[in-house]
Image: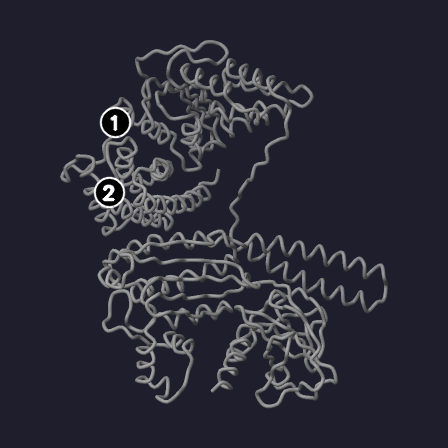
């Protein structure tokens, strides 16, 4: 086992558990008696403490143990979670996260972190009835403490009996351990696992086995030859006990036999079980007498016997994984039900995000190479070759879709993090603000998710500070005392839309306009639309706040929001109604890597329009060349504004006698793009434009075609903005 890899797994899983812990704590503030949430919080702390102990991370264990003790009192109904305790547990979760960061950086906590640990432990101990001056972690007064201080387990006087067939004749678990030779080399201490067992229950009897130790002349100090036979009394189930040895399972032989009282429980569970899990191993795992790891080990033993393989039940009993009575009960249960199809299980694996990025890049190169192959096949005029390349293109498209789906993640994880933000900021502002989340299952590219967090944070904090009014103001306006902040996400025309809405007072149009005139952004006699006025808040240094707070008012942030969103090829718009509230609407592409495109030609140059935004293609009516700014046509009774790409990009030469219009839609608005020729669908690998093209309007990147030529990708949202601006100018 690679200790470094195991530690990395611990770091990742600890951070995930802390996120779950925070979400549960935020939920329990609204539902303080929800046992599922309480148990989830306890399990998270318990798992982090246990795993940290296996790596010798005592600074995490000692702090988390106190928090776990408080949570244990909550779980046993000795304590009730009130707002103060919830806030303290949230602070404790944050601190555990910082301690995990220390572990990730392979460093010991500094004095500041240690001082913070002491402060929080003092606060937690008040709930445990421990005076601050004696703020030490409570430990069980068992004989295992003596074993710990002496450095070796001792043999207890309590006797236990074990009969044939693997059945334990006491009310204790029997744990048989044989550590592998490589345990020391992998950085593991066998005694740390024994010590951790004492946090789950009492070690009633333990025998240290030394029979595997070789003669002194053959002894290698780096080899581990220890084994233990343990009688263990605990109320936990088998999977929890096995989890203690998670990080040495590959190097050790571990057998866990249940007490007699547990066997009776397992027999009852098997008899009451529905007839879904019909395989013997599935039945034993479902009732809790066998773990998945033990089942897999038994199956490997069975497979290794080849033609002489025996039934799995015999293997389990022979290797003391399950007792004979339990196996017999499971076999009897099998006879009571008919054969059924195997259950499908979804298995998850962790993959480095850099590997996914590399895969997408390779798929992109494959698409470009495939386009070149298809072009050569068409030029060859060989039907068989054309058909073969067409089949290859379809397969490449399937590979592309599968690869892109690997990078798609739900935005719910990002939304959930704002529950803590809303809670903390509302308390700081002295407002009662509640968060509503919709569309959490909406998926988008992980790259977009990673980069949208900061802009969303600015918008959320801005809505809470400037948008939602104080309680007395809301009551005076006939509104509920609590304000509501909504996060919503949905798909629309190949884009993802993210909305940040509040039911506050809305944007003050006159105040924004006055500030803009004062700063010289708008002329006093200039006529501009409400939308243009609202968008002024995205100008650098723009603020209408009367006073500066810790959250906002300095005029920084909103311009960064727009810049970051535009860097993702997205747009942000504002809707506001005085006294009713505001909505910030962000539109982003689903992916930044590969898209389905529609290839068009203008003056011999190729351009790509994102296919999801294309509604239809029509021929430009003869004589409808447009004069001046009057570029409109009648599309089945609907006025359709259009823009000539030839004019926009200053393409030289005259247009052909026949021109076409590609009708596109974005954000609920339609417009037409006039082109010379329609070339059809095209798998488009998006490449970013260089800095020299940073000021080019209407372009979102480029792609390489099969011929090796470059095609520019049109930025439809920017083109639509130009069309909209032209309409406003004409209206004036």
Q: Nearer the viewer, mark 1 or mark 2?
A: 2
First along the sequence among labels 1 and 2: 2
Read off the residue under disc 1: 140
Kindly identify the residue that appears in the image at 38 percent across and 49 percent down.
104
Kindly identify the residue that appears in the image at 63 percent across and 62 percent down.
364
Residue 150 falls in image quadrant: top left
Kindly identify the residue that appears in the image at 30 percent across and 45 percent down.
29
Residue 45: which disc?
none
Read off the residue under disc 2: 82
Relative side of 366 to 475, left or right: right
Placement of 508 over or under 47, stated as above or below: below
The answer to whether residue 46 is visible is no
Residue closest to the eye, 408 or 691: 408
Residue 683 falls in image quadrant: bottom right
Tag 2, which secondary structure? loop
Q: Position of residue 525 (x, y in %)?
A: 37, 89
Distance Cα–Cα, label 1 vs label 2:
28 Å
Relative side of 622 to 5, left or right: right
């Amino acid at each position: 086992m690679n200790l470094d890899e195991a530690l990395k797994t611990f770091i990742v899983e600890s951070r995930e558990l802390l996120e779950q812990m925070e979400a549960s704590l935020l939920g329990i503030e609204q539902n303080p008696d929800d046992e599922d949430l309480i148990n989830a919080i306890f399990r998270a702390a318990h798992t982090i403490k246990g795993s940290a102990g296996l790596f010798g991370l005592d600074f995490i264990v000692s702090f988390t143990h106190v928090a776990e003790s408080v949570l244990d009192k909550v779980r046993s109904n000795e304590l009730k979670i009130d707002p103060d305790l919830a806030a303290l547990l949230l602070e404790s979760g944050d601190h555990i996260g910082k301690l995990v960061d220390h572990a990730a950086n392979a460093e010991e906590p500094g004095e500041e972190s240690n001082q913070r640990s002491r402060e929080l432990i003092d606060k937690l101990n008040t709930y445990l009835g421990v005076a601050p001056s004696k703020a030490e972690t409570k430990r069980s007064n068992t004989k295992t403490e003596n074993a710990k201080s002496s450095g070796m387990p001792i043999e207890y006087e309590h006797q236990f009996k074990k009969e044939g067939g693997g059945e334990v004749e006491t009310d204790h678990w029997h744990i048989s351990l044989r550590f592998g030779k490589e345990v020391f080399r992998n950085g593991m201490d066998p005694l740390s696992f024994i010590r951790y067992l004492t946090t789950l229950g009492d070690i009633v009897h333990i025998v240290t086995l030394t029979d595997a130790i070789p003669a002194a002349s053959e002894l290698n100090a780096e080899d581990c030859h220890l084994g233990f036979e343990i009688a263990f009394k605990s109320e936990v189930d088998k999977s929890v006990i096995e989890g203690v040895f998670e990080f040495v399972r590959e190097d050790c032989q571990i057998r866990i036999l249940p007490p007699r009282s547990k066997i009776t429980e397992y027999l009852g569970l098997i008899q009451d079980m529905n007839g879904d899990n019909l395989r013997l191993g599935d039945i034993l795992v479902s009732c809790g007498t066998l773990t998945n790891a033990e089942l897999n080990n038994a199956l490997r033993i069975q497979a290794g016997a080849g033609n002489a393989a025996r039934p799995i039940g015999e293997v389990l009993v022979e290797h003391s994984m399950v007792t004979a009575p339990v196996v017999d009960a499971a076999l009897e249960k099998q006879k009571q039900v008919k054969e059924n199809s195997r259950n499908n299980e979804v298995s998850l694996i962790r993959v480095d995000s850099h590997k996914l990025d590399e895969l997408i890049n390779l798929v992109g190169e494959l698409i470009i190479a495939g386009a070149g192959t298809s072009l050569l096949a068409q030029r060859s005029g060989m039907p068989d070759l054309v058909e073969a390349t067409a089949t290859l293109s379809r397969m490449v498209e399937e590979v592309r879709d599968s690869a892109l789906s690997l990078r798609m993640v739900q935005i719910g994880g990002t939304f959930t993090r704002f529950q803590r933000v809303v809670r903390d900021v509302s308390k700081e502002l002295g407002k009662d603000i509640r968060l509503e989340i919709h569309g959490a299952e909406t998926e988008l590219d992980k790259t977009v998710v990673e980069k949208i967090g900061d802009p969303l944070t600015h918008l959320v904090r801005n809505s809470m500070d400037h948008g939602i009014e104080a309680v007395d103001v809301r009551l005076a306006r006939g509104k509920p005392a609590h304000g509501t902040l909504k996060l919503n996400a949905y798909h629309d025309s190949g884009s993802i839309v993210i909305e940040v809405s509040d039911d506050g007072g809305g944007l003050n149009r006159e105040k924004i306009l006055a500030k803009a005139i004062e700063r010289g952004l708008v002329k006093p006699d200039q006529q501009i639309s409400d939308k243009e006025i609202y968008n002024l808040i995205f100008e650098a240094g723009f603020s209408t706040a009367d006073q500066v707070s810790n959250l906002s008012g300095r005029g920084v942030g909103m311009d960064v929001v727009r810049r970051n969103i535009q860097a993702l090829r997205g747009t942000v718009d504002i809707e506001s109604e005085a006294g009713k509230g505001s909505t910030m609407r962000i539109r982003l592409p689903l992916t930044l890597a590969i898209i389905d495109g529609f290839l068009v030609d203008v003056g011999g140059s190729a351009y790509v329009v994102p296919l999801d935004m294309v509604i239809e293609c029509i021929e430009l009516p003869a004589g409808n060349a447009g004069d001046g700014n009057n570029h409109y046509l009648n599309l089945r009774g609907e006025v359709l504004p259009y823009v000539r790409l030839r004019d926009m990009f200053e393409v030289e030469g005259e247009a052909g006698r026949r021109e076409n219009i590609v009708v596109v839609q974005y954000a609920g608005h339609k417009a037409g793009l006039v082109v010379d020729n329609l070339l059809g669908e095209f798998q488009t690998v998006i490449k970013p434009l260089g800095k020299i093209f940073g000021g080019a309007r209407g372009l979102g990147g480029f792609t390489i075609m099969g011929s090796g030529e470059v095609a520019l990708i049109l930025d439809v949202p920017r083109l639509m903005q130009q069309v909209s601006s032209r309409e406003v100018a004409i209206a004036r």
